[in-house]
């Protein structure tokens, strides 16, 4: 039986809210780095690990056979598909914007996407220090708290406010910086806010004209992508490919092509960085 996406959203929202509360209330004043991943600046704090464990525990209490993909806890394939259900997978970034969280900057989020048979059907991005919870259900719309979201009207590139992000490896950052530098005179301005999930939500909320980034992971993008699409954005990679680690571009229809084409002109679609 295919699970009801609204019920999945309700559980995702409850789990994300509890994890967000934990991350706010239990953040040690002297929070340090517990571990590093792809580079010395790609950090994990004890709270990333604790928040993801809590999300998994709360979901498993109600749905013990489901699969998981999490930034900190990795993949767990569950038993749902074997049992012939619509297979459900929970895609978790317990703290997206870990560096902001480490520095006690408020711009970070807890992101939980829910896939059924490989399709994202519901998503939550909770930003407790901003007082915002973004939600979406496939085909039904996207919200910030109780407000329905809609992207900005299309604009020309020269008037576009565009966000991006940078990876953690020095060589990739050098190229990303050069591309952002070359894009800068062609757009209104560039933002680097530090949470890919919230960048996608900002496109959904009409607070940005576009966002692009190379190197994000599925857990950074899963919930935010659905939220952006449900608010009217196009979210794709280069040349019609699905958004992926190679590239994720999000913008309203009508702004998307100008941003995509400018990035291609600047060589952002080369695979050598
Ligand atoms: C990071 C943030 C950041 C983006 C990086 C991501 P994390 O996620 O989303 O904005 O630029 O690419 O890795 O590591 O804080 O979960």
Image: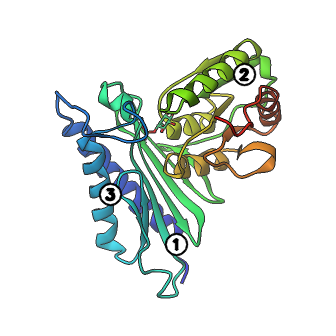
Specify whether 139 is left or right of 256. left
Whether pointer 1 and pointer 2 mark residues with C-beta atoms closer than 8 Å, the reply is no
The disc, 1 or 2, on the residue closer to the chain's N-terminal end is 1
Q: Quadrant of residue 251?
A: top right
Precedes in sequence: disc 1 or disc 3 = 1
Q: Establish if 129 lies above or below 158.
A: below
Residue 2, relative to residue 123: is it above or below? below
User: Among all residues in the image, which is located at the extreme bottom?
Assistant: 83
Image coordinates for residue 5, horizontal then vertical, percent: 53, 67
Count neighbours of disc 3 (C-alpha within 10 A) and say few if under 14, some if 14 to 19, many if 20 or more.
Answer: many
Residue receiving disc 1: 4
The local crowd at label 2, few if under 14, some if 14 to 19, many if 20 or more residues have their Cα within 10 Å, is many
| Label 3 beta carbon within 8 A of ligand 1 | no
Picture coordinates of residue 47 (x, y %)?
Answer: 25, 43
- Horizontal relation, residue 53 to residue 264: left or right: left
Residue under label 3, please give it: 55
Q: Is residue 10 above or below residue 193?
A: below
**Along the line of sight, which residue is nearer the eye, 38 or 53?**
38
Task: State the separation of the CA atoms marked 1 and 3.
Answer: 20 Å
Secondary structure at badge 2 equals: loop
What percent of the width, then of the height, locates residue 165?
55, 30
Left or right of 167? Residue 177 is: right
Q: Earlier in the sequence, mark 3 or mark 2?
A: 3
Secondary structure under badge 1?
A: loop
């Amino acid at each position: 039986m295919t699970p009801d996406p609204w019920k999945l959203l309700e559980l995702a929202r409850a789990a994300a809210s509890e994890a967000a509360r934990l991350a706010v209330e239990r953040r040690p004043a002297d929070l340090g780095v517990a571990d590093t991943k792809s580079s010395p600046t790609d950090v994990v704090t004890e709270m990333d690990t604790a928040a993801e464990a809590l999300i998994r525990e709360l979901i498993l209490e109600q749905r013990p056979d489901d699969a998981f993909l999490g930034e900190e806890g990795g993949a767990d394939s569950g038993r749902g598909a074997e049992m012939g259900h619509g297979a459900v997978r929970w895609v978790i970034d317990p703290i997206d914007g870990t560096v902001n969280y480490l520095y006690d900057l408020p711009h970070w989020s807890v992101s939980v996407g829910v896939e059924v048979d490989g399709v994202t059907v519901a998503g939550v991005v909770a930003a407790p220090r901003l007082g915002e919870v973004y939600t979406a259900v496939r085909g039904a719309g996207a919200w910030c708290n109780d407000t329905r979201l809609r992207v900005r009207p299309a604009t020309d590139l020269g008037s576009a406010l565009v966000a991006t992000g940078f990876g953690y490896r020095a060589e990739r950052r050098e190229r990303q910086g050069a591309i952002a530098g070359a894009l800068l005179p062609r757009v209104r301005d560039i933002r680097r806010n530090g949470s890919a999930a919230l960048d996608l939500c900002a496109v959904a909320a009409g607070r940005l004209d576009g966002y692009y980034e190379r190197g994000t992971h599925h857990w950074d993008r899963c919930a935010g992508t659905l939220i952006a699409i449900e608010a009217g954005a196009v979210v794709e990679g280069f040349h019609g490919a699905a958004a992926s680690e190679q590239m994720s571009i999000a913008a309203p229809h009508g702004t998307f092509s100008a941003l995509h084409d400018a990035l291609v002109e600047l060589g952002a679609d080369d695979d050598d960085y």
